[in-house]
Image (cartoon, rainbow, N blue to C red):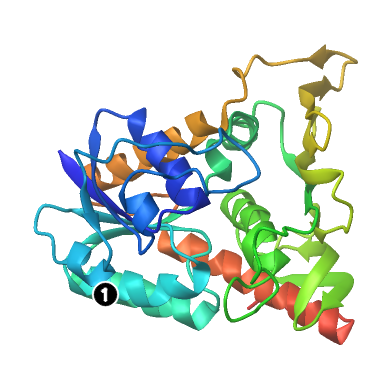
Amino acid sequence: MTKVGIAGVGFMGWIHYLAYQQRDDIQLAAICTRNEQKLAGDWSSIKGNFGPQADQVDVSSLACYSNVSDMLADPELDLIDICLPPDMHLPVALEALEAGKHVFCEKPLALEPEHCDQLVTAAAAADRLLLVGHVLPFLPEYMFLREAIADGRYGALLGGHFDRVISDPEWLPDFYDPQRVGGPLIDLHVHDAHLIRLLLGMPTEVVSRGRMRGEVVEYCQSLFTFADESLVVSSTSGVIQQQGRGFMHGYEVHFEQATLQFRFSALADEPELSPLKVLTSDGQVERPELGDGDMIVAFAAEIAEVTASLAAGQPSQLISGELARDAIILCQRQTESVLQGAPVSVS
């Protein structure tokens, strides 16, 4: 059985920990954190914007490391799950690959496209797999969309719009630092950039209009051009300075024979869900049954994709390092377009 060590016990480390508890085909065997309380099993200080609140965790069966190099030297571990801050992804992933470990890195893969290329090259040289935690394709609403495009059940794809907006994440002090977290595009919109790349291929051009906050885009709207110029694809993403809406995402995607609509908002009083609807060309409204909306299920499905990729010895077609690199390229080009006030070639 594949044994995995989590590097970094913050919000995403907690979410990945919960996901591993739902799998019996992979074993969480180690954790690494410099926080002594977390090493002892007190994870109550972890904050995030979805999922259950972290509390006490039984770490008695885990190897607990305070130094990541020590964990990477553990011969029992096959896979390193990197849940560290984004600026640490590159050095730790490189060290893990050099130590002969497969790498599953939480998004973003790295802060710059050239760093992503460096990791893709290093994984190939080490004959190890590099997989990236872009969970969106595993959420039921997005999985439904992915399958509808793949099997053509509603005819040809015409395009669509993707939304992802949050309030100012006050629990992330380095959020707007381009050298630490990367800002709203790299940390937030990268989900939709990855999805757009996965579903439609790489755009040829992007034009974005938005507001800057220091060196990073705070909020923008983007229009993507593809080799198939009949596709009309756009996105909205970033930060709006109102704490009443902590998080919102959704999409409206158009096919020849139907429109798919979905939206979820985490509000200060209570969440609001507009479930997935299929609006058909003959005037019908279909409402697919997609489960109870438990986000941890999607992360467990993502872990299943990791184990399947490891078993096959082949990069996943959904969460490969190459796809993650392309998402970072798109975010970089969107930033360039906002700064230039003009369309930017993606190539």
Residue 96, located in which quarter of the rendered image? bottom left
Find residue 165 and report its horizontal and vertical position in percent: 79, 52
Please say whether residue 124 is visible from this viewpoint: no
Look at mark 1 in the image and give the residue it sits on: 95
Image quadrant containing the C terminus: bottom right
SS category of the residue bearing label 1:
helix
Pick whichever, 314 or 175, lies toward us: 175
Residue 91 found in image quarter: bottom left
10 Å crowding of disc 1: few (<14), some (14-19), many (20+): some
The residue located at (88%, 16%) in the rendering is 282
Q: Residue 80, relative to residue 157: is it above or below?
A: below
Q: Nearer the viewer, residue 73 or 62?
A: 62
For image coordinates 62% across by 51% down, the residue present is: 195
Q: Amino acid at mark 1?
A: Glu
Q: Quadrant of the N terminus?
A: top left
> Residue 17, position in %: x, y?
38, 41
Q: Residue at x 70, y 76 (%)?
A: 333
